[in-house]
Amino acid sequence: MNQLQINISELLGVSPWVTTYVFVPLFIILMASLITKVFRIITHRYFERSSSVLHVDPTRYRFFKNAVSFIIFLIALIIIFYTIPELRSLGVTIFAGAGILAIIIGFASQAAFANIISGIFIVTSKPFRVGDYIKISEEFFGTVEDITLRHTVIRNNENRRIIIPNAVINNQTIINSNIIDEKVCSLVELGISYDSSIDLAIKIIREEVLKHPLFLDNRNEEQIALNEHPVAVRVMGFTDSSVKLRAYAWAATSFDAFVMRTDLYKIIKERFDREGVEIPFPYRTIIMKNTEGKA
């Protein structure tokens, strides 16, 4: 025990044992937490300001903050080992048997290292960034909130957080709605009866899509010069009881496309009802045989 610890014990009026094994580790952990908190506040303000001014992706900054926080707590743990004699001797013993320990830790921490390496790959290759709206396989979709050393946090449409290990997300098929162009083409599919007018149905669909406030005219200069309609509607085929129509309605974002599509299904259905365009439903023919009369 050094002179500083003895002086602290005398100042606090406690035994040197309490100072060495209780107050010093707590003080080190408190300082590490304070340094981490101050560092994250300063970097958050600086990086967020730089990202908005320079139009730089903040994903790497978030990952950098998490990595530095991890390093600060790792240094604090090493200092605690150094200040406590028993832990210091344990550390020497651990390093003496580093070969066996490395094998044990290697097997025990494969998943942890895989998540860290996968997180680095995600940040450098950027298949998605913080703020992107992504869909993973067919199960999870939402907005990326954070990318840490171990996992990626996604906020879904129910405002719940989906926490996925980086190693898992790195091996999945990802649909990113924001990586290059945020515009989304929403497919509005409807079926009309064989007795209804296809031209009238297409006319109604186009008018209602054009009137929707979230619709985005995505035609290029060539299409405008050729006088192509802003809303493409195509006949996709025939089913047992209906003719399938598909409208291509563009919106500025994925969420706008979802809202617009749900609105259009209601609006178009009501317009079809008013103008006599039938949306068919399955018919079932039942034949009743009079077996008693036949006998």
Image (cartoon, rainbow, N blue to C red):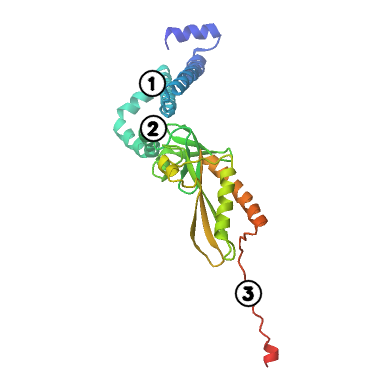
Residue 267 point in image, percent of width and height = 63, 49
Q: Quadrant of the C terminus?
A: bottom right
Q: Nearer the viewer, residue 295 or 263?
A: 263
Marks 2 and 3 close (CB-CB < 8 Å): no
Which labelled disc corresponds to residue 123? Answer: 2
Any part of residue 18 in sight: yes
Q: Nearer the viewer, residue 105 or 216?
A: 216
In the image, 194: left or right of 292?
A: left
Any part of residue 261 in sight: no
How far, Cα to Cα, is label 2 from label 3?
60 Å
User: Which residue corresponds to the image point at 70% horizontal and 89% vertical from the top-left?
Assistant: 292
How far, Cα to Cα, is label 2 from label 1?
37 Å
Q: Quadrant of the N terminus?
A: top left
Mark 1 burial class by Cα count in 10 Å: few <14, some 14-19, many 20+:
some
User: Which residue corresponds to the image point at 35% horizontal and 35% vertical from the top-left?
Assistant: 125
Q: Name the residue at the left extreme.
A: 99
Q: Name the residue at the right extreme.
A: 293
Mark 2 or 1: the one toward you:
2
Q: Looking at numbered disc 1 in the image, what kind of residue is underneath it?
A: Arg
The residue at which mark 3 appears reads as 285
SS class, disc 2: helix
Q: Quadrant of residue 118?
A: top left
User: Which residue corresponds to the image point at 70% horizontal and 90% vertical from the top-left?
Assistant: 293
The residue at which mark 1 appears reads as 88
Marks 3 and 1 close (CB-CB < 8 Å): no
Pointer 2 or 1: first along the chain: 1
Residue 5 point in image, percent of width and height = 46, 10
SS class, disc 3: loop
Q: Looking at numbered disc 2 in the image, what kind of residue is underneath it?
A: Val
Q: Is residue 81 above or below residue 59?
A: above
Pointer 2 or 3: first along the chain: 2
Mark 3 or 1: the one toward you:
3
